[in-house]
Image (cartoon, coloured by chain):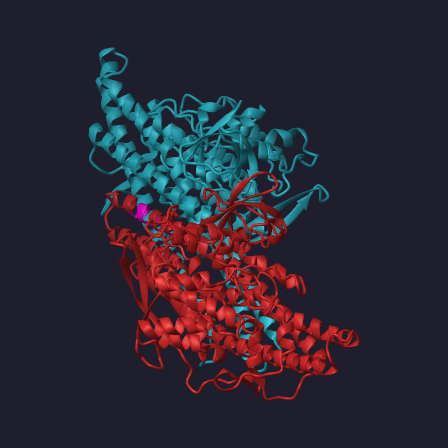
Chain colours: A cyan, B red
Amino acid sequence: MAVKAQVLYDFTAEPGNNELSVQEGEILTVTNQNVGGGWVEARNSRGNVGLVPEDYIEINPGSTQAPATKYTDAQNQGYNSSSANTQGVNGNETWTATTWSNNNPVDNWNYAEQEPAGNNGSIYSFDEEWDDDSDDGKSTVGYGGSQMEEGGTMQRGGAHSTMKISLNKFPGFSKTPNPEVYLLTKSVAKGNDKLPIYAGEVGPVWLYPQIQLDCVVADPKKGSKMYGLKSYIEYQITPNTTNRPVNHRYKHFDWLYERLVEKFACALPIPCLPDKQVTGRFEEEFIKMRMERLQGWMSRMCRHPVISNSEVLQLFLNYRDEKEWKLGKRKAEKDEFVGVKIFSTIDPELPELDPGQVEQKYEMYSQFTRSMDNSVKELLAVGHLHWKRCTGPLQKEYRQIGKAFQNLSSVFNTSAYPRESTLTEALSATGKTYEEIAELVAGQVSEPKKDLHFLMETNNEYKGLLGCFPDTIAVHKAAIDKVKEADHLVTMNKISQQDKHIMEKNLSTMSYALQAEMNHFHSNRIYDYNRLMQFYLEEQVKFYETIAEKLKKALGQYTTM
Amino acid sequence: MAVKAQVLYDFTAEPGNNELSVQEGEILTVTNQNVGGGWVEARNSRGNVGLVPEDYIEINPGSTQAPATKYTDAQNQGYNSSSANTQGVNGNETWTATTWSNNNPVDNWNYAEQEPAGNNGSIYSFDEEWDDDSDDGKSTVGYGGSQMEEGGTMQRGGAHSTMKISLNKFPGFSKTPNPEVYLLTKSVAKGNDKLPIYAGEVGPVWLYPQIQLDCVVADPKKGSKMYGLKSYIEYQITPNTTNRPVNHRYKHFDWLYERLVEKFACALPIPCLPDKQVTGRFEEEFIKMRMERLQGWMSRMCRHPVISNSEVLQLFLNYRDEKEWKLGKRKAEKDEFVGVKIFSTIDPELPELDPGQVEQKYEMYSQFTRSMDNSVKELLAVGHLHWKRCTGPLQKEYRQIGKAFQNLSSVFNTSAYPRESTLTEALSATGKTYEEIAELVAGQVSEPKKDLHFLMETNNEYKGLLGCFPDTIAVHKAAIDKVKEADHLVTMNKISQQDKHIMEKNLSTMSYALQAEMNHFHSNRIYDYNRLMQFYLEEQVKFYETIAEKLKKALGQYTTM
């Protein structure tokens, strides 16, 4: 079935790159989502086919029945459908399931001895399958078949069909979890499981730890098994609490991510593991980029007061041996306080809120996260264009200017006229300077840890994070709808007056959770963008000063007259 | 007849600008040379039509019979045809005769009372016709009908047919002047008419005046006549010798140019009046640009030791009243020492040269001017591309980056989260800074007296100058061929042994003239490019420092953490 997409921003094709110029609002037919490198192939209404940056389009989720081919921004659609029908697929995922199907559990389950086929040339896909530890096999199957349990667990598809496996590789909601089970719950978790919320200066806040957890992801090492047939990368993760490194492969990060989604995604946005977006022409580049993004993701998880304190993250960072790791894994997979049940562990030590107030706050949060999502995407779009311009035509142009000055110098050298060596040498130096500027221009945007690169990476992270909010907020909106029905249910004798009061109290708890989470988001956002902008501007100042310095040096070579 | 053109450099079209991507070596059919602004419309072999920068193509002069539609770079063809058949049209002219036919003498002669029709919208063409002073009418007709007199005067077409008038507006050689008349001349001009050549440090040099002549072209004033039906611009020219301003209209510059070509072009490259290339969306802009270029042309004429000393330039700069001007004009138009006869006024006080030495030098000069012509065109081509990029997509991109930062600031402002006004204000300031950078980026290349603008103007001037060398050198090569024939002519009794010696002596004089001229060219070239590059680099340093300064200021607005 044809996948349609709407164009979000004007995009002008660079000639000779197989690109397609598109205009905001235009509807395209996506012809290939597996192009890679941030591009999709699409056809416009005039039948022209070409590449379009994926950030520039929004694929219409209604246009296809196969969730596996759904697109990253599909989740935004869920935003508009107010409650039950939020069908968004994981908001941050830019690789389609088919690209990665060679890594899916069933393939590997059935063909464990074979090298996965259909490897995409320019995409590095190390062996991250789930079959190498035999004791994990059971737990993989144990993910369960039913797509949505009555408890409203945010559970991904099971492992028994390709379709479901694809979903499994795209964790997210297949529909909004039903908050009803929680709303009627009376008990509150005790002890360590309790998640308190306090009144902070900015409103309701989570309990922050004394020392903020963080970790360093470093030292990627290539390992292999099956007599070298399969290779993988192992990263060293060192938490600041123990300062003792643990090793993890990508599949372990993926496992952690799935646990966090299961347990927290109804209350907290859990951004996807970012690495599947990574492409690189060289293996080294790919590993470096993946590591950088895993670092960003891990730091974000560590900085979260609820997640950082969770047993599963503590296990991931602190396990002492294989035995502890395996036992911890099994325990985490059996955790009962997952999905909407997470709210029953939340204990706001604050006065109960009125449902009306709650609803108003949700609208504000919806509005803000949607606006910021748009703004971040705009920044990514212009940043992407600028990146393309700087590494492409602009770099080429400065090189050509440099070459033209050098050629003029060579011609002048043949004049046989005396006393012009100062000029020809200065001209040649000027030419070389412009060639250096060409490299600086491209470097400012493309080199890791530089200007635009960092700007893009951080905004990409936020794009992923913001993509999770609609689903999280949808759970809260569904809860409001349930509470609104409560009066009617009391009349119908389906629930007691007492039940209704519990529902309202629990709704208030949910609201505090969202407020605490929004305040956490805001404080992180301010910190991150402050740091980002300072870094970006510092680098930009350096960049322009370096160019001025180089040109000044070239200028000094000319004769003063 | 279809005008063909060969593509000199690859050019990539910017989408949406009606441009045509072309590749080096490709043959195009020119469909419209009157587009203006440095562009021509052309069709490629696949039938696509679009605009191509005129600097990127070379129109094939063999492809059309109508000289009026010949193209600027046609002259380069003359370069390759070694002697008699140098058919080059004026090398520097980018406007076709048809564009300017409303100004041609015959139109105005016949329809003096009418406003010229067919005025091209965006091209300012002030009334520069020749009919307003009745006493000039005769002299216009007096340009004569025969296209090439036996004396080898470098004379343009007559004024009696449209075709010839078109040629009249494209001064240049219709064929290489025959140097024979001069070669057999025994007499040498005396007194003031004598042009000495001395042995300088760098070789043969012209006699340079004690004080270098220069002038300031300024204060353009709009005048009108015929009850306001026709308007013209009068410029004030003030020479440094008298410090007394004289007024001239464009047509007077044109008259001066024609006299200088007639008199000197066999010996000295006389670059075209540059102004016909000027376009501007606003009259003011047009007048400013034309004045700037007239200034450049006049300064170059004043700086030339032979031209600066000529009666006609002295008249142009120093006439005291209308009567003196008119008398001087008539005298100049009757000057007999024009064309190849100019060499009979040259008196090198140096030992006679061997014809073999002479030929070798000519080859070297040919080679050098051709190489420099290519190099200057390359610089113009990349400069033009860069100009387009900076004023178009790059300026737009920096504006978009600025806008994106400001939008993010607006969104952050709606968060209702306390303590973020520092960030939103800093973000907004950053956005404004990038909008300012957008204007700086476009300004560095497009504003008069700025970086790339000056680089382009100076190189355009040199392109015009270099375009004259092939024709000048062709006269010298023709003289060598004549001298080579001399032995045969002696045998045939057509000339005496004495005549042969005179020819060889005269060839030596011609050679000294060219050497003196090349040395003048080299010394000017070194001066001009030194000055140009210093100015360009100084401006570029300022440009990058200004940006760094602005960004530093924006950076200072963020909270230090």
In the foreground, A212 or B511: B511
In the foreground, A335 or B248: B248
Residue B149 lies in the magenta stretch = no
Residue A30 at what x, y percent from top left?
52, 30
Q: Is residue A439 visible?
A: no
Residue B196 at what x, y percent from top left?
54, 85
In the foreground, A540 or B116: B116
Q: Is residue A365 visible?
A: yes
Determine which quarter of the picture holds residue B549.
Answer: bottom left
Q: Which residues are magenta?
A: B405-409
Q: Residue at x 24, y 14 (%)?
A: A488
Compared with A453, A484 (above or below) is above
In the foreground, A311 or A301: A301
Give left or right: position of B513 versus B548: right
Most extreme residue toward the right is B491
Q: Residue at x 29, y 21 (%)?
A: A482
Q: In which quadrant is the C terminus of chain A drawn?
A: bottom left
Residue A539 at what x, y percent from top left?
42, 61
Determine which quarter of the picture holds residue A75.
Answer: top left
Residue B407 lies in the magenta stretch = yes
Residue B351 at what x, y percent from top left?
65, 88
